[in-house]
Amino acid sequence: TSVKRTKNLMKVPFCDAVVGRVLNALGEPIDGKGEIETNEFSLIEQKAPGIMDRKSVHEPLQTGIKAIDALVPIGRGQRELIIGDKQTGKTTVAIDAIINQKGQNVICIYVAIGQKESTVAQVVRKLEEYGAMEYSVVINASASDSAAMQYLAPYSGVAMGEYFRDHARHALIIYDDLSKHAVAYREISLILRRPPGREAFPGDVFYIHSRLLERAAKLCDEKGAGSLTALPIVETQAGDVSAYIPTNIISITDGQIFLETDLFYSGIRPAINVGLSVSR
């Protein structure tokens, strides 16, 4: 296979034609439903809106989960972290939030990073079962894809979300999960022989996540009053929220929903620890 440089920055298609489709990190369809007919492409790296272009978050985004909507409510344009150990229901909370957007005029983007192909297929089936694929886009960079594809996937997703935000519409994006995204970036950085820091992550691992999550915003009325809400997911090891990546993302986001293994196995589901969960 010959490889040639295009000398162009990475672009993905952005239009209503992507809704209802399953794409890879390059914005190419992988669902066997044919090509996406569009001439509109957006750079995956865009500057986050400045303070004058934003408005304070004031409209609620209902997840359909009473524990969240009553105790840690999420607003349109907010960034709310879903954090917890493996198998505590993090993806389930996110998928429930997507399903609950039916009839709310919210476009949902689910970005799967480093997940098993079977897990992503299960998510797509669940969304189809509840009629949620009609207003959703799934971007998949699975565990079998290269680290570069896993690194690019969330930026491709947010570029598509910004199209709806900038056209006075509302969008919700889920990154599942940013722990695997950080690991993919660490792999790329070590191959590039960049000096490793704490837990062998490169020094700019905070910046790659902050510039991604800062692109979620509620725009002011002059800019159309659109919004992009982000629900990043982070997987902890043995409930350790003080590890490097969890603390980084907690400090970037506007609060977190903390899911606990003990609550999950005692039958309290969703296993939300309301004492440690917060919405700012």
Image (spheres, rainbow, N blue to C red):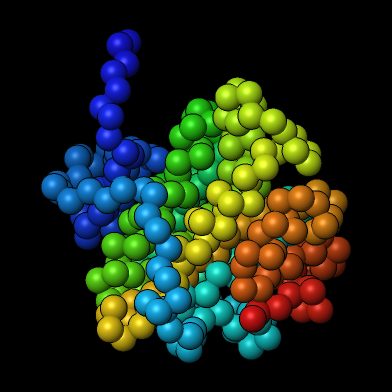
Question: Splitting the image into 4 quarters, where does residue 53 fall?
Answer: bottom left
Q: Is residue 2 left or right of residue 218?
A: left
In the image, residue 246 lies at what x, y percent?
73, 56
**Closer-to-camera residue (147/264):** 147
Residue 166: x and y, percent?
29, 69
Percent across and percent down for residue 151 are 51, 39
Q: Nearer the viewer, residue 151 or 88?
A: 151
The residue that appears at 71% across and 51% down in the rendered structure is 245
Can residue 11 be seen at all in this image of the molecule?
yes
Q: Quadrant of the N terminus?
A: top left
- Image point (33%, 77%), residue name: 226
189 up-or-down from 66: above or below: above
Task: Residue 156: give x, y in percent of width and height.
Answer: 39, 48
Say which residue appears at 82% left-offset and 57% top-offset.
242
Residue drawn at 63 percent across, 23 percent down: 193
Q: Is residue 132 above or below residue 106?
A: above
